Amino acid sequence: MAAFSFMGFRRPDGRVGVRNQVAIVSAMDNTNPSAARIGAMVAGTVVLSTPFGRGQIGHDFDVTLRTLAGLASHPNIAAVLVLGLSLKAGEPLAARIAKTAKPVAVLGLQDVGSATWLTARGVQAAARLVADASELQREPCDLCELVVAVECGGSDTTSGLASNPAVGRFADRLVDVGGTVILSEPAEFMGAEHLLAARTVNAADARRIDDMVRWFEDEARRNGVDMRGTNPTADNIEGGLTTLEEKSLGAIAKGGTRPIVEVVEYAEAPSRKGLVVMNTPSAACESMTGLVAGGAQIIVFSTGRGNAIGAPVAPTVKVTGNPHTAAGMAEHIDVDVSGILSSGLGLDDAGELVWRQVGKVAGGKLTRCEILYEQQLSVSRFGPSV
């Protein structure tokens, strides 16, 4: 497999972006409409908002702040405009973002006088930030600076046989050249968690993987749900998956085979290079939001029966090994590895297809999710609002 290099945007904190967007961040629900209007009026922006932000307390609020700050501080973001009900409300989030040394502006609805004025002032501020960001140039970057998250959704028999192993080949190769791969969704490890735990470089992380899987099972049971009776889901079963263990073995295949160097929490950035496990929910939008907030510049998303959604900020590369999905949902698929099942395509060659596509996306090629605006943000909640 031939190597690739990529041209990226070097940020003041030393990290590298594969995109060069300006983020319009709504720190709370009541400025979301203004953020949406500003984003619609200013090219080169991405809107980051949540339906929550007020009345949150404790760990739940800390995670929301960490996630929004991680998204806005992301290396694919060149500059940030933060909106809040007041300047005082927006400044804590802006202060976290400013630690990366990227330009940050803050506006408060109450301070400017109305949502109309907030929109007008926001358009002016965002336009200035975009103009400045557009002068930044790509430069040669080392592969070890890539952080790629692997995700799956709409799984079927072909996921475990074709697309997930192909993504796993890519993951091994990126780790081998010094990059970072993030595997998530511990609820999808159930029945195979011991295999991942055995690959950790320290015993504490092995216990954390076991504890994460057990937490999801216990939490489901506490709410009257037996995950062993509801997973695989109805659409998974319709796609040919027969047991929870079969689904889990397929899910972990996308992380490759290398040692696990670290286990991190939702929206937490890895501190080590190599294969990392992040604790996220299984819902794709929530999981991808945590992965992007943790610094993943690109997401590689394996799907069997088909799933159109992608993440904002980080381009999402869709991979399928199902020939029917590759044909019927072609407008959503970036890499077709269905030849593994239909024409004798080898796993190494399939991994090469993923590798080359990620290289192109890192250099600026748009993914299908970006082209079709199939992007959704969903910050996980960990407690009630008061």
Image (spheres, rainbow, N blue to C red):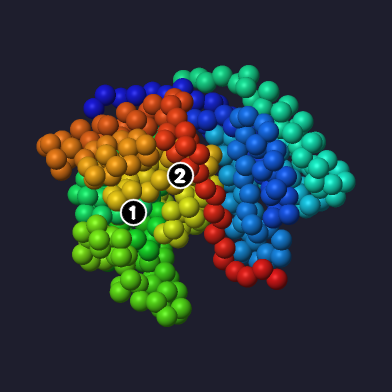
Q: Quadrant of residue 332?
A: top left
Question: Can residue 93 be seen here?
Answer: no
Mark 1 or mark 2: which comes first in sequence? 1
For disc 2, the neighbor class at 10 Å (few under 14, some 14 to 19, many from 20) is many
Residue 56 visible in image: yes
Relative image position of residue 157 (x, y in whole percent): 21, 54
Residue at 57% x, 29% y is 20
Horizontal relation, residue 344 to residue 110: left or right = left
From the viewer's perspective, is 81 left or right of 168? right
The amino acid sitting under disc 2 is Gly
At label 1, counting other C-alpha atoms closer than 10 Å, the crowd grade (few under 14, some 14-19, many 20 or more) is some
| Residue at point 42%, 29% (across, down) | 361
**Foreground residue, 105 or 269?**
105
Q: Position of residue 346 (x, y in %)?
A: 15, 36
Q: Residue at x 38, y 66 (%)?
A: 213
Q: Which residue is mark 2?
A: 310
**Circle number at residue 154:** 1
